[in-house]
Amino acid sequence: MKIQLFILVYVLTLSLVFCQEQEKVNIEKVLNNQLEYGASAKNEVTDIPTGYIFTEEDVNVESTVIRKILDNNGYKANQDDFNDKITKIFGTKQINPFYINTLEGKCNINTKLNHDIFDFPSAQIYVIPNKQIIFPILLLPQLIDYQKDYPKTALVEDKINKSFVKDDYKVNLKLWREVKDLSKQRRFNQQLLIARNKYLFNDDPSQFVWLTNNDKDFMESLVTTFGYTEDKKLLNWVMENNYNKAEEFIKNYVFVKNCQGDLEIRKDILKYIADNTNENENTYYKALESFGYHTSDNKFFNKNEKTKIIAYIANILSPLFYKYTKLEGKALWNPGTMLYNLSISDKNLIPEIEKNNYYKLPNLKQAIDNLDEEAPPLPAN
């Protein structure tokens, strides 16, 4: 029995050593390739791509390195919980790795992992389901102290030709070892990976402040680009950040088309407006009202969608109007509700809403019943 146990331990140890050695070989191979292309390049006119393509091999190696960084910093992930959160955020169920461009929207899911690192690398979010992590495009020198951890591989930089002619232009290559703040970049990148993954997949609220101070574009894109509004703290932060451009925010991010081309209404944003409007503050109320008045001119939606949009807006705005116009406050209000004004200009609006059973909205029937009591409207701005 003891001999059998010894053999089992010996085999497992050999297997572990082999895996570690193979992992080191893989890292050295990818690192060598990345170092050969340099950190950046420029010709006599402008910055240019180094030509390095982020491939599936890069993804496999770097996801392993990143997962180790996370594990060493207390990251825990359950496969089912990770999958559920990815579906909630990105609206897709994927078993294989994929990346998505935060600048292009959530409908552009890429399972072909090759990508030019010069093309907005921070906007490319790689999702690796089997390792339960997400990360932007980062090269190994941006993650690890390669000169310390892989000194033999680092010597390849001694052999690189830093100056050459390409397309009739002189090109100058900057090596990774010449990037002055590289160690600072590494610390930031590691913290970024830890904070994003622990906040999203460990539900770690302690990461929120760091992310909203240092990763604003990504955090805002979760709500604006991907429609992830279940996180109320995140939603509140995004809404507060956009008060000064409320009309633009409402125009672009409340009533959108999903990946099938159908109307999607982000109801949590409407609820935020209802909860944060009062007699002294109606910035988002006014923005939503303005959007409603201009819906008929919107070529993005068809007639049925426009009616539904008006219904959802009225369901929020009319109760707020009736409640807060009776109170003395600093906020300015139009003399009539949006629904009243639009019902005067479009005689088919109310019958169409009623035909659709008020879209099962809780406040809409009462809002329509109140229309007869409203004063004649003034022209909307």
Image (spheres, grey):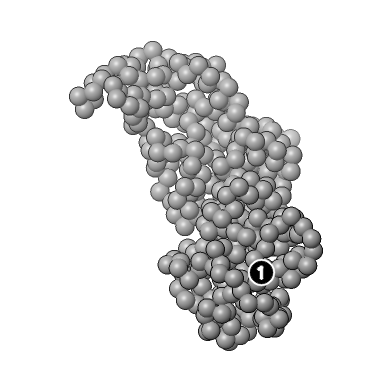
Residue at image coords 52%, 39%: 136
If the image is split into quadrants, where does the C terminus sit?
bottom right
Q: Residue furthest top?
A: 158
Viewer-closest of 117 and 332: 332
Q: Is 73 displayed left or right of 154 in the figure?
A: right
What residue is pinned by disc 1? Answer: 335
Q: Is 351 displayed left or right of 49 in the figure?
A: right
Image quadrant where residue 198 sits: top right
Viewer-closest of 70 and 376: 376
Viewer-closest of 364 and 155: 364
Residue at image coords 23%, 23%: 169
111 lies above or below 216: below
Secondary element at tag 1: loop
250 lies above or below 77: below
Q: Amino acid at mark 1?
A: Pro
Residue at image coords 56%, 42%: 217
Bin the neighbour count of mark 1 within 10 Å (Cα to Cα): few under 14, some 14-19, many 20 and up: some
Residue at image coords 74%, 55%: 330
Does the image show residue 51?
yes
What is the number of callouts on the image? 1
Viewer-closest of 298 and 270: 298
If the image is split into quadrants, where does the N terminus sit?
top right
Q: Residue 144: where, in percent of width, then height?
A: 55, 25
Image quadrant where residue 300 sits: bottom left
Q: Residue 149: where, in percent of width, then height?
A: 55, 19
